[in-house]
Image: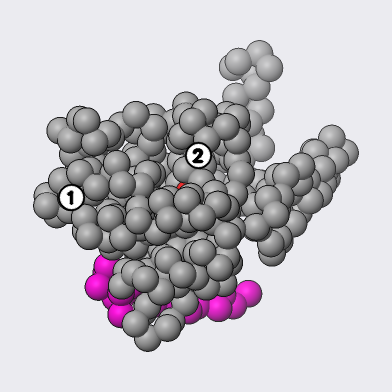
Amino acid sequence: MSVQKNKPARRPSIHDLRRMKERGDRIVMLTCYDYGSAKILDEVGIPLLLVGDSLGMVVHGHDSTLRVTLDMMIHHSAAVARGAQSAMIVIDLPFATYSSSDLPLSLRSASRAVSEGGAHAVKVEGGRRMAGVVGTLVASGIPVMGHIGLTPQSIHMIGGYRVQGRSKEAAKRLMAAALTLERAGAFAIVLELVPAPLAAEISRALTIPTIGIGAGAGCDGQVQVFHDIMGLDESFLPRHAKRYADLASVLRDAAREYKEDVEAGRFPTDDHSVDTNKQLNLTDDDLKELRKEFGA
Ligand code: KIV
């Protein structure tokens, strides 16, 4: 079977992303949490892989991202880094590992994410209050992606997974937050669940790229959660996601077939066995002797 390869020539830098915005090239980002998927997404040429803290929900089964630790993020990011040779890897700093009131903690967390997790950039959630964090990390040489709109780490403050920036005041706050993050040194900003016309306006106002999720086609790029678009959880599909595959049913069918094959004795066959007295120097007499010696 031939594998269609569409690798970017080299890993994109934050400067390449800005040039892509200037040229009007749309930027593709997808979440990724493990080595095998990273290899596939890298091979296809997805330039940005996000080790999102959504892994707490889609991989670990928690009901929010608040239970995710920095160690969990690093563990997954390191696996993705081993699989992706050409993509830029962005890692989420998880809940309570960064704060504008504790910049040394923020720097320690981001440094571990990059040095132990093999990520090339970190993402932090929050608007104007994140300016200090962004500035501190950028001054230490760590590229930072912002994330405004729906910020799941503040879910208890927001009160639910709902669209942000619906009123004039809220829209102004989001625009101001985006401009503040850009001035602080962010190289890109995720806009999550932001009304499409507002997201387009913010994208026009910034010189850095916006990456939308549920924020319309006017953003400079798009990000989606792997499990949503691949159909790994049939019970849930957010309105902003499109299902490109039905992996849950592919996996279910394969698992069922495997179970039935083993139960019926159809698997393994000689083809799947390592020795049928042909490849090893083990004769029938040797086996007879073994049986005698061990009383089997
Ligand atoms: O954690 C995540 O997957 C994210 C995306 C939804 C942007 O932050």
Query: In this rendering, would 70 be left or right of 143?
Result: right
Residue closest to the eye, 41 or 100: 100
Circle 1 is placed at which residue position?
Answer: 135
Say which residue appears at 24% left-offset and 47% top-offset: 131
Q: In the shown orientation, is residue 56 left or right of residue 210? A: right
Q: Secondary structure at mark 1?
A: helix
Percent coordinates x, y for residue 179 in the rendering: 31, 60
Q: Is residue 195 above or below residue 110?
A: below
Q: Position of residue 150 (x, y in %)?
A: 51, 46
Res. 152 mark: 2
Q: Quadrant of the C terminus?
A: top right
Q: Which residues are magenta?
A: 1-19
Give whichever of 181, 284 is nearer the camera: 181
Q: Looking at this view, name the residue that lies furthest to the bottom.
A: 23
Residue 122 in the magenta stretch? The answer is no
At a point 57% along the width and 72% down the height, the residue shown is 217
Residue type at numbered disc 2: Pro
Q: Residue furthest right?
A: 264
The answer to whether the beta carbon of the residue marked 2 is less than 8 Å from any atom of ligand 1 is: yes
Query: Where does the image place residue 228, in percent across and percent down from the top left?
Result: 64, 52
Picture quarter with the N terminus: bottom right
